[in-house]
Each structure stands twice: as structure tokens, then as C-alpha cells.
Image (tube, rainbow, N blue to C red):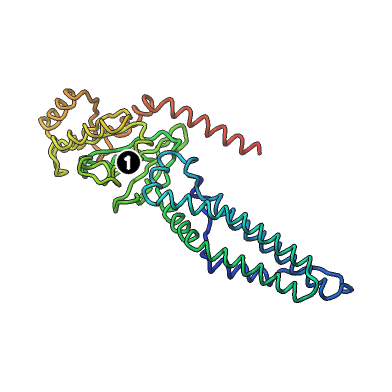
Amino acid sequence: MNFKSTLPYIPNAEEVVRQLISKYKSIEAKSPTSLPGVERLRRLEVARVKGTSGWLLNLFRNIAFNMPFMNDLHPFYRELISIIINIDDYKHSLGKLINSSKAVGSISRDAVRMIKNAQDKDEIVKARKMYLSRVIDLINDLEPELRALKEAAIKISRLPSVSVEKPTIVISGMPNTGKSSLVACVSTKKPEIADYPFTTKQIIIGHVKVYGMYAVQVIDTPGLLDRPLSERNKIELQAILALRHLADSIVFMIDPTQHSGYTLNQQLSLLKEVGQSFKANIIVAINKVDLATEEEVRAVEDSLRSLGYSYRLTSALKCTGTRELIDELINGPLRDKLITYLRVTHERALGAELR
């Protein structure tokens, strides 16, 4: 996501004050040597006030306008961010920073006016002290907001990097049913492993090459879709709702051998819950067919027919039937979104070349 690449560095109040004073002292102003000393000092102090206030305005605005605006985000990221930070506090901090920019401008104008109207050196020095004192007080008053935004930026930077535009296949099912192996089989680009917020587990993101581009992403979500939703806390449920915004198709994997440690009834129960919770089309992969007996496979097939789910036989361990499964989705339910994504990507690339 582009918003992650533009996250600004956010200093604390002490850093800002230190940089402000350093910049103030470093600014010079050219003045004819024939000018009286008080006039040279006047020009110098005006230049320093304008220079440092301009720098501070740019700093505040860079932070405020390069942090993500919630209303502009895709629902997936909007929901994720709302879980890891307090949105009301976040908006308050951004608002106060923007308002402080206006205050800096007002303080600067007051100081410049006082310096220009000063009758002697003492009055210029007084105006300088007033300016620095007011600005430093303002910066110190922003310490809680700067700290909150810094923490938010760190948390946001750690979010998993997924494309909200690419056609997306979410792999679900109980643990040890072969989800990660399936992602590895169908991904021609090395899968990426990313920490998912609010859980110690990780998501695995694979990319499938179509027409010479990594145009489809496949996401394995261990720790999120591997047990009944009724057993989950509110944070986990929100995470699942966030994934709902990404899934164009879902591959639900079932282990007929039950080597995963889960019975067929447990796996079918989770399948029903996933079907009720997601609007995306679901196809079931009866996995580990190289290890399962005919009776075990037949039992799963009979259950899926009675539930009305389509299925395919796979062995993720040997990558048997896995690419065919993904190709079926690419040429079926994902086709329209894939065509749109390829066209938009091509138009962007062409526009970049023309520029």
C-alpha cells in the first residue's frame, strides 16, 4: 500500500525544540555593512523568525498530511488500523497538529511585527525571546500528540503489505491441512511471511503469475480461520471481518486422513461458519489424497455433495492438482476482476512511460 511508503518520521517534542534552536542560530541574513547595527540585527531576527516558523510549519504539515486519512483507506486497512490504534485519539492528534500549524503562523506574524516596530536592540531581543518562548511552549504542549502519532506510525508500518486491487484467493481451514503448502505450490514468487496484528500467528502471501505478471495474490491465514468463530474474541472477529474485504474466492482445505488432529465433523463445521461469514465463492480442496484411503475421500465427497459445495482433489505436498485448482478460479470467478486489474496496471505503466 502506498500510504505505508509515505509514513513520515515523527520526532518527539524535545527533538523538535533542539532542531528549532539549532536552525534559528544557523540562519544568516545579508545586510549592507553601512546599515546601523540595530537594523542589521532587525533583518537577522526577521529572517530567523520566518525561516524557523516556515520549517516548523512544513514539519507539522508533512506529518499531518502523510499519515493515513481513515476515510481514504480501503476497508481492509481501515478495519485493521482501527484495531491496533484508538481512532478517536488518532484523529484528535492529527487535528491538533494541523491547528498548531495555524498557531505557528500567528506567533510568527506577531514576532515579525514586533521586531519591525522595535525602537532599539533591547526591544528586538525581547521580541526574539517572546517568539522562541511561545513556539517552544507550543511544541512542548504537542508532546502527547507527537508521541501518539509516532506510536501509530510504527504500528501501521508493521501491517501486512497486501494489494487491495489484485484478485485475491484466501486459503482457509483447520491447522495442518496443507494451507501453507498450497500457497507454496501455486506461487511462482517466494511467499512473503508477515505478522498479523493482534495475534502471534502470521499470514503468508503468495503471488501467482498470470500473463507474465504477478497479478493474483493467495493468502494463507493461520490462526484466523482455523477454529469456530464462536470461540473467538472481538479482536479476532474484527480481523476476520477485515479479511472479508479482500477475499474474492476462498479455498477451504479439508484433510480426509484427520492426521491434522481434527475430525471431519469439526472441519465441516468450520466450513459452514466460513460460508456464513464470507460472501466470496468457496471451493473445497480435499487435500492429502496421496495419503488418504478411498473410503476417507469418499466420506468427504458425500458430505460436501450433501452441503452443496464444489470440490477438487489435491495433494499440496506433491503439488498435485493445486495449480489446476487456482487456474480454475482465475478463469472463472476471478476473471472479470483480473481483466480489470491487468488493464489498469497496463494503463498506469503506459502513463508512467509517457511522463
Circle 1: residue type: Val
User: Looking at the picture, how far across and down is residue 107, in whole percent?
Assistant: 66, 61
As helix, strand or loop, the secondary structure at mark 1 comes to helix
User: Looking at the picture, how far across and down is residue 64, in whole percent?
Assistant: 55, 52
The reply, left or right, for residue 118 in relation to residue 191 is right
Q: Quadrant of residue 25?
A: bottom right
Q: Quadrant of residue 222?
A: top left
Query: Residue placed farthest to the left in the image?
Result: 295
User: Looking at the picture, how far across and down is residue 165, in whole percent?
Assistant: 45, 36
Q: Nearer the viewer, residue 38 or 24?
A: 38
Q: Residue at x 75, y 62 (%)?
A: 113
Circle 1 residue:
183
Q: Nearer the viewer, residue 38 or 282?
A: 38
Q: Residue at x 44, y 58 (%)?
A: 151
The relative height of residue 8 versus residue 313 in the rendered view (above or below) is: below
The relative height of residue 264 versus residue 31 in the rendered view (above or below) is: above
Q: Nearer the viewer, residue 133 or 82?
A: 133
